[in-house]
Image (cartoon, rainbow, N blue to C red):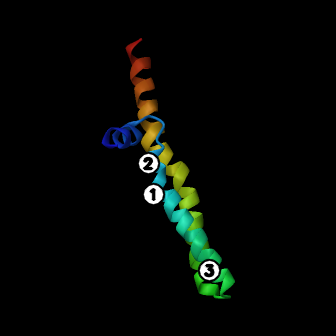
Amino acid sequence: MRRILAWLAKGEEGHAMTVPPLLAAAAGAIVLAIGAANDSGVTAIIGGIVLALGIVAVPVVTHMVVDWDLYARIEKLEDKK
């Protein structure tokens, strides 16, 4: 299990790094649904904001974790030629 978790965290695919923002987005969706069902505007607004931030954070985290490393390696390879 440790080996699998280490592989997920260090893999170039970046799947493990996008889990925290996705969990935040899921929590925001749940809070949004609860706020909408209870007709509570403040709860629905907070849930919507957390959901939106979670959704926007996924590509940002992917770019920071995966893309920067890949582009850095490509730059190193191009400089060697």
Q: Which amino acid type corresponds to the residue marked 2 in the rendered image?
A: Met
Q: Secondary structure at mark 2?
A: helix
Residue under pointer 3: 34
Contact flag, marks 1 and 2 (Cβ < 8 Å) = yes
Residue under pointer 1: 20
Residue under pointer 2: 17
Q: Measuring from the top left, give residue 46's x and y in whole percent.
A: 56, 78
Residue at mark 3 to residue at mark 2: CA–CA distance: 27 Å
**Residue at 62 percent of width and 75 percent of height:** 32
**Residue at 45 percent of width and 31 percent of height:** 70
Say which of marks 3 and 1 sits in front: 3
Q: Which amino acid type corresponds to the residue marked 1 in the rendered image?
A: Pro
Mark nearer the N terminus (3 vs 2): 2
For the residue pair 13 and 70, the one nearer the viewer reads as 13
Say which of marks 3 and 2 sits in front: 3
Quadrant of residue 28 in the image? Answer: bottom right
**Residue at 46 percent of width and 41 percent of height:** 14
Residue at mark 1 to residue at mark 2: CA–CA distance: 7 Å
Quadrant of residue 6 in the image? Answer: top left
Image quarter (top left, top right, bottom left or bottom right) of the C terminus: top left
Mark 1 residue crowding within 10 angstroms, few (<14) / some (14–19) / many (20+):
some
Mark nearer the N terminus (3 vs 1): 1
Residue farthest toward the front in the current orientation of the protein: 1
For the residue pair 75 and 24, the one nearer the viewer reads as 24
Q: Measuring from the top left, give residue 80's x and y in whole percent.
A: 38, 14
Mark 2 residue crowding within 10 angstroms, few (<14) / some (14–19) / many (20+):
some
